[in-house]
């Protein structure tokens, strides 16, 4: 499937109000045809331009050669495609720089002077339009619609006609000479003496010929206008998205309040599944990459399926929770849509610039993205930032047990003891460590953090927080602590040590009813 048709198909997944802000691929494609026709109609070859500009882009590779070769490279006419002005008022240009004192350039110019005296065989071919000169720089345009009165003011008719008639042939010869000289330097190992070459360069003064591309200018004006509209839509959507996140936060505070214990635990389970889904970004240290649109959609589908399998949505009892969940799903769906919109625009721009370069022989795909800072416009970090905002908001509203677990037993750190090194352990694990004469912190290896801990190290603020948000976990932790203490008491009274299997059997028997009574 061609990309134009693919773009139309995938645009159906984008909200209707966003579709006008997609890059108009077909309209730009039509202008590319006019750009290519404009260049070819003025006698320039797209294939030769591409070859010259491609070599010019690799000029830095020549700089690693010896000094003699560098001087030889300086004798080559330079061809450059670039943009002048600032966004959004930029114009594409082709610039030819050459040294008229170079022997081969002089020879070429003399041939052009002789050929200009002969009748022009291509009289019907449109010529380049001379516009102005400044500091050894002659500026031409590919436009054929110049005002005749304006032309008379600029220069005399004879002078202007002479420049028009010779410029196309001059550009052709400069292109051919550039390619021939570069091929010769790449293959040749014999160089002229450095002193003679330096003197030649001192004698010569570079002259520049600039061609302004009118149809190319129209192409980039349209592309820049569309990118500007896309950037505005992205900014507006991002601001609205952040407002919706704040609104969801307020709803969640009411729906998952600690006073609503059953709702809070349902939300905690949902959020745990959501984090496991890793819809937008990986959670593991080995995989922090941003997900593609296709994978984000798959993970979102998996998340909803898991909720349905566990019947978590049916367990909501309040309207606030149901409304908050719908808003939560809508936010994630919109974030995937925004990411999809970004990818479509980014792909459309890359494809259209590639087609532009292929048809015209120019190199816009190399310089244009840097000009408009497309990294900010199409950066996946935007979706990542919004996703991080969602997760941070939910984490603050519905804290997870793993974030408050004792690093030894991995359960909620009930009766939290904060050591002098600021690490937190449950009181049970800390007492065990002190009995085993462990003096240092097991995390940071502080030499006396465990030994010096006392009841004064109890973090009462954290204890009240845990009691408020983790009542079930604390109840289970208390039961485990009581069981461990009972086993220790039995072992102290009997003087025997029991195996894990015996302890499990004893634990099961303690729950059985008395057969006599």
Image (tube, rainbow, N blue to C red):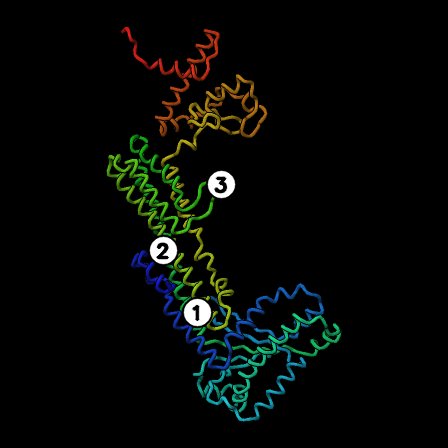
Coordinates of residue 108 in the picture (x, y in percent): 62, 84
Residue at image coords 53%, 72%:
50
Q: Nearer the viewer, mark 1 or mark 2?
A: 1
Is residue 231 among the parts visible in the rendering?
A: yes
Q: Secondary structure at mark 3?
A: loop
* In this view, 249 is above or below 72: above
Q: Secondary structure at mark 2?
A: helix
* Label 3 CA crowd tier, 10 Å (few <14, some 14–19, many 20+): few
Query: Along the polypeptide, which appears first: circle 3 or circle 1?
Result: 1
Rounded to the nearest whole Å, what is the CA distance between mark 1 and mark 2?
24 Å
Rounded to the nearest whole Å, what is the CA distance between mark 3 and mark 2?
33 Å
Q: Nearer the viewer, mark 3 or mark 1?
A: 3
- Along the line of sight, which residue is nearer the eye, 41 or 421? 41
If the image is split into quadrants, where does the C terminus sit? top left
Name the mark on residue 220: 1
Q: Quadrant of residue 327?
A: top left
Query: Along the polypeptide, which appears first: circle 1 or circle 2?
Result: 1
* Label 1 CA crowd tier, 10 Å (few <14, some 14–19, many 20+): many
Side of 134 where 424 appears, left or right: left
* In this view, 396 is above or below 360: above
- Along the line of sight, which residue is nearer the eye, 507 or 371? 507
Query: To which residue does mark 2 refer?
Result: 236
Query: To which residue does mark 3 refer?
Result: 285
Query: Along the polypeptide, which appears first: circle 3 or circle 2?
Result: 2
User: Given contact means CB atoms under 8 Å apart, are the residues at marks 3 and 1 in contact?
Assistant: no
């Amino acid at each position: 499937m061609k990309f134009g048709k693919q773009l139309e198909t995938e645009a159906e997944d984008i909200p209707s109000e966003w579709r006008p802000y997609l890059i108009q691929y077909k309209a730009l494609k039509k202008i590319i045809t006019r750009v290519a026709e404009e260049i070819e109609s003025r006698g320039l070859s797209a294939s030769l331009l591409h070859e010259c500009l491609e070599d010019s882009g690799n000029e830095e590779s020549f700089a690693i050669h010896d000094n003699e070769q560098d001087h030889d490279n300086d004798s080559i006419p330079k061809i450059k495609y670039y943009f002048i002005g600032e966004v959004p008022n930029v114009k594409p240009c082709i610039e030819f720089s050459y040294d008229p004192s170079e022997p081969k350039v002089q020879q070429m110019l003399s041939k052009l002077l002789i050929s200009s005296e002969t009748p022009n065989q291509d009289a019907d071919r449109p010529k380049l339009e001379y516009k102005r000169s400044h500091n050894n720089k002659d500026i031409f345009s590919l436009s054929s619609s110049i005002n005749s009165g304006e032309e008379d003011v600029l220069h005399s008719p004879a002078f202007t006609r002479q420049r028009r008639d010779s410029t196309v042939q001059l550009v052709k010869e400069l292109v051919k000479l550039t390619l021939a000289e570069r091929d010769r330097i790449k293959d040749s190992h014999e160089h002229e003496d450095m002193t003679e070459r330096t003197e030649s360069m001192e004698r010569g003064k570079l002259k520049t010929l600039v061609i302004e591309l009118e149809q190319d200018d129209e192409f980039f004006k349209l592309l820049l206008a569309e990118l500007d509209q896309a950037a505005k839509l992205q900014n507006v959507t991002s601001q609205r998205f952040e407002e919706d996140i704040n609104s969801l936060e307020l709803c969640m505070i009411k729906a998952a309040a600690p006073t609503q214990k059953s709702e809070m635990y349902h939300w905690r389970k949902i959020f745990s599944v959501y984090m496991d889904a890793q819809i937008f970004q990986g959670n593991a240290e080995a995989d922090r990459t941003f997900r593609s649109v296709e994978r984000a959609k798959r993970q979102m589908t998996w998340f909803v399926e898991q909720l349905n399998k566990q019947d978590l949505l049916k367990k909501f009892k309040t309207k606030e929770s149901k409304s908050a969940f719908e808003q939560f799903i809508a936010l994630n769906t919109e974030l995937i849509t925004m990411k999809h919109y970004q990818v479509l625009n980014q792909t459309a721009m890359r494809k259209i610039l590639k087609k532009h370069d292929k048809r015209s022989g120019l190199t816009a795909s190399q310089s244009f993205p840097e000009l408009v800072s497309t990294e900010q416009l199409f950066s996946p970090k935007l979706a990542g930032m919004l996703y991080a905002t969602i997760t941070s908001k939910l984490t603050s509203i519905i804290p997870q047990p793993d974030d408050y677990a004792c690093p030894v037993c991995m359960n909620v750190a009930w009766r939290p003891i904060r050591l002098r090194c600021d690490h937190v352990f449950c009181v049970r694990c800390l007492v065990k460590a002190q009995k085993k004469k462990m003096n240092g912190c097991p995390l940071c290896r502080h030499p006396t953090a465990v030994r010096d801990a006392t009841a004064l190290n109890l973090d009462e603020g954290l204890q009240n927080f845990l009691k408020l948000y983790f009542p079930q976990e604390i109840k289970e932790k208390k039961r485990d602590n009581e069981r461990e203490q009972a086993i220790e008491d039995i072992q102290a009274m009997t003087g025997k040590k029991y195996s894990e299997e015996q302890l499990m059997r004893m634990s099961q028997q303690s729950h059985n009813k008395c057969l006599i009574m």
